[in-house]
Each structure stands twice: as structure tokens, then as C-alpha cells.
Amino acid sequence: MTERNVELVVNGNPTTVGVRTEDTLLNTLREGLGLKSVRGTCGIGICGTCTVLVNGLPVSSCNALTVMHAGASITTSEGLAQDENLDEVQQAFIDKGAYQCSYCIPAMVLTVRSLLDRTESLDAASIREQLGGNLCRCGTYPQIMTAVESLIAGRKP
Amino acid sequence: MNLRKQLDDLLVEQLEVDREDLHHEGGAAGIKGTAQMLGYAEILQRAELDELTGEGVFQSSEGMSTLDRETGQGRASVHWHEGAVGVEVEVDVETGRIRVLQCHGASYAGRVINPLRVKQQNEGNMIFGLGPALFEELVYDSGQVVNPNLSDYMIPSILDIPERLSSSAVENDDESADVHGVGEMTVPPLAPAIGNAVFRATGVRIRDLPMTPERVLRALEEARAEATT
């Protein structure tokens, strides 16, 4: 078992973590750094609940090795709010009731955040396509769509 | 439910017997002491009726009354599954694939406290129910689940939701009415609604869940083969 020190920027804070080479970002963030919004489920990158943003892009942290992400900037749901102010995506999810048991929601919020940051215009079909990898057993998808659509409507000049 | 009584009324007329002499078994009725039985469908056909509708009331003995408001212990809400779902489907007869175009679910919700949460349950449960109705299945081999992960037993994604999905809560406006649980109320009626719609569309009954393209196609081919012999 080999241990390494890896430097990450987690939610804007430069951090050095001691990890084993087989540790995934999921282990490191959730167990090592206590960021409990990062949630493992399938363990094979299918369900999307462990999604974090790596340099702004959504990545399944359950099958991403921490040692391969030296220097990366990682965002979890904990890092979205600025001081007391929730991110607009978080606020829209609350306003539109886009959550039930909420297990999948932190990852869903991050995926939407990344989508809005990367994309100029989005229609319903492309939102569904982009969120197709985030499963929600409660079936809260209609309210999630409503929340995302409200964000897109809100940013039009 | 007074369906049994309505059937008896029809039989008394059709068979010219006394109500006391009738007996029912396995979806059929006949005269006591004789072997011949009439299926319920046949009774309706003889009476030239398309359907019978039964009405009934069940009074639960206890509701909120079992909740001790001091301790929070006891039953907080009554929860019987009174849900109904209607669907519109499209069946591809070449591939056997079912597409649910439209879905409406309703449940008895008693006194509604949070309308959004009721809506989420009613609609989310139909989305949940699409899985076991159409494609989600745990497969066992010698008692062992062989597809235990989300990659192999499919649950509905945001790409699977019907184009038109709506719901309604049947509310009790009485201020003193009980709070009524709405959890998973529209799950049980969804698969039967889809099965009935597929039957209406194709004439084929699918009796196993999930109603996968393979099962639908096999049933369609059996029906075609029967029709040609």
C-alpha cells in the first residue's frame, strides 16, 4: 500500500491530503475531508450521486483516483454558497421544490451549475440529455426541470 | 362494494333463480349444487352491459386519534392506498416497445398540508412506477440476485419521463379532516393502467412485469400466429 500527499484545491481552499494510491475522490472528499454531500451509490459511475466538479466539469468521484487529480480544482455542493448566500441553482431547487429525499440533489445541483456555466442556450431536450446521468429514485425530475428552466429564463436579457 | 349484489341481480333475472341459490367462485357464478358456472364477463354480455361499477364505503376505525400529541407517539396519519392512474400509450408493433405518452395520477389526500409535496409524490411515484412497469427487474439465479447494481436493473432517468405528466389530489376540505398519507399512492395503479392501455391498443394482454419489448413482441407474435391458424 503506497501513500502519497496530493495537493488539491477544494472549494477554493488549497489542501494537501494524505491518500493511498487506490483512494477515489469520493473517499478522499467524503471520508477524508468530511464533505458529506458527496455520496456514493453504484460505485461504477452510472448513477451520478457522487458527482463533483473537477475544473468545472462534472465527474463521477467514485471512479476517479485522487492521485490522478493533483493540482485540480474541485467543487462540491458545500462550496457553492458564497457566505450566507446560496448559489442561484440551490435557491432555484428550493423555490421550485426540486427535492424529496434529496440523496441525489447535491450532485444534481452541481451538474446543473456546470451546465449553466458551460452552455449559452439550452432547451428542454438538451437539459434532459445532460441530466440523464443523474438518477433520482423519488422521480423528482419534473420539479428539477422546472427549476432549471426557471434559471435559464431568468438569465435572458 | 356492491358489485356482487349487482351481479346477483343480473343472475336472478338471467337464470330465474333465487338470490340465496347462487354461489361465486374464481370470477364466475352459478347455481349451488350444479357444476355449470358463468364467467362474470359472460354475465355482462348476456345483460348487454359493457361494464359494472361498484360503490362502497369503508370506515377506518381510528385515524389521527391514535396520535398522542404530547409524545408524538402513535399513528400520525391514515394511509390506505387510494390511488388511480390513467395513461395514453403508443406500442411499436415492430419492436414491442411501449411509450407512455401521457400520464395522469390522482390520490385521496385527505386534508392537504403541503400541495407541492403531494404533487411531487403523485408525479414522482408514477415516474418511479414506470421502472417496474416497463423495464426494471431484479433477476435471480438459484436465489442469488444477478443484477444487483444500477447498471443492470434499470431505474427511470429524466429521459424516461412521459411528455405529459400531471396529477391531482382528491382533497377533503373539512378543516377537521384527517391528514392522509400520500406516499407511493400512484405506484400500484400505474402498471395495470399501462397493461390495460396496451390491451386496448393491441388486443394483447401482458401479464408479466416489466412489460419489456421482448415480452410485448412475443405476445404480439403469439396473437398473430393464433389469428392465422
Image (cartoon, coloured by chain):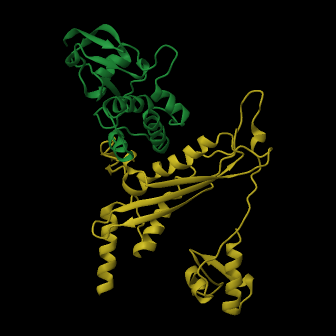
Tell me if residue B196 comes above or below residue A43 in the rendering.
below
Quarter of the image where one finds residue B54: bottom right
Q: Position of residue B89 (x, y in %)?
A: 43, 64
Residue found at x 32% / y 67%: B92
Task: Count how many numbered circles sit on residues in the image.
Answer: 0
Q: Is residue B105 above or below residue B38?
A: above
Residue B5 falls in image quadrant: bottom right
B47 lies left or right of B90? right
Point out the residue furthest to the front here: A157
Q: Residue at x 45, y 32 (%)?
A: A105
> Which one is in front, B36 or B162?
B162
Quadrant of the snapshot with the C terminus of chain B: bottom left
If the image is split into quadrants, where does the N terminus of chain B sit?
A: bottom right
Q: State left or right for residue B18 relative to residue A55.
A: right
Question: x%, y% of residue A64?
Answer: 25, 25
Residue at x 63% of width, y 55% of height:
B82
Q: Is residue A45 visible?
A: yes
Which chain: green?
A
Q: Residue at x 29, y 74 (%)?
A: B221
Front position in the image: A68 or B70: A68
Residue closest to the far bottom: B16
In percent of width and height, residue A88 lies at 47, 27
Residue B149: tell me if it is visible: no
Q: Residue A121, image x and y in percent?
A: 34, 39
Q: Is residue A47 left or right of residue A157?
A: left
State whether residue A111 is above or below residue B147: above
The chain letter corresponding to yellow is B
